[in-house]
Amino acid sequence: MKRLAQYWQTGFDWRAQEAELNALPNYHQYVEVDGFPALDIHYLHQPSDAPDAIPLLFCHGWPGSYLEASKMLAALKQSNNGVSFHVVAPSLPNFGWSEGTKSKGFGLAQYAQVCLSQ
């Protein structure tokens, strides 16, 4: 534990991490969800240069985040045997930089509605 604490105090470069995160194609959008107030949803969106690219929605699990998709963005954007993808990777509500819900009852149907609104 001391070694980990020492790394965070002296070895971890938050500004370098911050620069990497800011270099990603980040966006925010308010999304209406039936029966709930609009939520500020953070997401990555990287369109492919190929006009016939396939839309790809990347949904993270718990404990995960949109950062899992960031590792694949470059490979998914480029054509591989004629196949490329337009990638959208939202931070689901209550995760990362997306707004959390403030009332009970927000379930799978509402998470799906958020993703379909992107």
Image (tube, grey):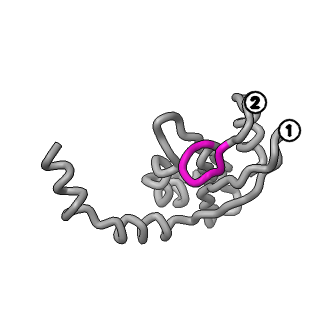
- Residue 40 is situated, as x and y percent measured from the top left of the image, at 71, 55
Residue at (61, 42) in percent of width and height: 94
Span colored in magenta: 94-100
- Residue 16 is situated, as x and y percent measured from the top left of the image, at 34, 70
Q: Which residue occupies the foreground of this view, 95 or 66?
A: 95
Instruction: Return the residue found at the far right.
Output: 35
Residue 106 vs 91, above or below: the answer is above
Q: Are marks 2 and 1 in contact (CB under 8 Å)?
A: no
Instruction: Return the residue found at the far left.
Output: 3
**Residue corresponding to mark 2:** 109
- Residue 1 is situated, as x and y percent measured from the top left of the image, at 17, 42
Residue at (50, 34) in percent of width and height: 62
**SS for dot 1:** loop
**SS for dot 2:** helix
Circle 1: residue type = Asp
Decide whether residue 95 is among the magenta residues: yes
**Residue corresponding to mark 1:** 34
Residue at (47, 51) in percent of width and height: 67
